Image (cartoon, helix red, strand yellow):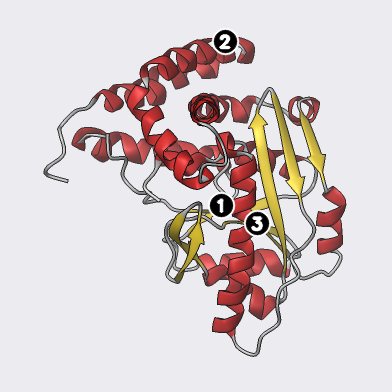
Amino acid sequence: MNGRPLFTPKDLLFFVYLLPFRMLAANLPVKVVRRIGTLVVHTYSLLAIRKQRSVQKRLTLAFQDSRGKGDVQKVANQYIHHAGFKDIDDVILNRLTKEDLLKCSEIKGLENLEAALSAKKGVVLASGHFFANRLGKRLLSEIGYPVLSIRNNSPRRHPRVGRVASKYLKPRYVDFVNQVIKDYVVIQDKDCTLKILERLRRNGLVDIHVDAGHSYHMMEYPFLGTKRFFPAGFLRIVYLTGAAVVPMLCTGNSCSFTIILEKPVEFQETSDQETFMSKNLARLVEILESQVLKYADQWALWGFNL
């Protein structure tokens, strides 16, 4: 931390987003906020050369020569745009009504969720970090399927954020995102597991990010041309409760987004928890990898150290 600069260009963007832009977004019409945001995102995408190169490098490794250089560059550019639009959606999400969300959305596989809920043991929505997740969960909540999110209130530090922003702006950002998500529990809460169990016992929905970078129990698997650790502890809850696990994918932005709910995962039954976790987490990682490869421009974690 001491070796990092006091201020960086990223800090200025961070400050503008959290203070003046949020104030404008709270008072201007949503359409105007989108137009301003689109202009800013387009300008940033033209300047973010270093970011694009980093993402392209990761994409090339993940695709393993299945896509050409031009295609990889296109996906990287789309990723930058989607990342920016996600930030715009965050500042307007609490202003969007149920009707607003229904007009610009499509839900595929709702019958799969209904089938999973019919067992009356709760449902774990297994998702990755995709840009439209908050939109998707808000819409599900609005139509009668409230989703409990699992949050990390101490996220990893961004490598290009200075010391001042890390100390003063990062806590503000965490509070802001918590206000956007609303229905959540943080992993730092000693009662986190109990709150998850309580929601499942009420036959509710709990969203678990399969690609989360922090968990007390992690397992390593091949992923996107390399190896990566994945959280396994939530499968202990699945093992004990018998809750169904439904893979969920949310793509797009607040102008047009899609929620895809797949059939509940058929897990391999085992005689002990450890084997259950290792065998079945591998299946969820495979599902996530296929989603990322198909919707590579929508996956948020290309910009982080994996």
Residue type at the position of mark 2: Arg
Q: CA distance from mark 1 to mark 2?
A: 30 Å
Q: Which residue is mark 2?
A: 35
User: Outermost residue toward the bottom?
Assistant: 271
Instruction: Tell me the mark number nearer the camera, choosing from 1 and 2.
Output: 2
Relative to 257, is 118 on the left or the right? right
Q: Relative to 176, say whether 241 is above or below.
A: below
Q: Secondary structure at mark 3?
A: helix
Q: Earlier in the sequence, mark 1 or mark 3?
A: 1
Residue pictured at 26% horizontal, 23% vertical: 9
* Residue 149 appears anywhere in the view: yes
Q: How many marks?
A: 3
Residue 134, x across and y down, in percent: 61, 39
Q: Which residue is mark 1?
A: 184
> How busy is the neighbourhood of tag 3: few (under 14 within 10 Å), some, or many (20 plus)?
some
Q: In which image quadrant can residue 226 be found?
A: bottom left
User: Outermost residue toward the left?
Assistant: 2
* Residue 127 appears anywhere in the view: no
Q: Which residue is mark 3?
A: 287
Instruction: Tell me the mark number nearer the camera, choosing from 3 and 2.
Output: 3
Instruction: Tell me the mark number nearer the camera, choosing from 1 and 3.
Output: 3
**Foreground residue among 82 and 172:** 82
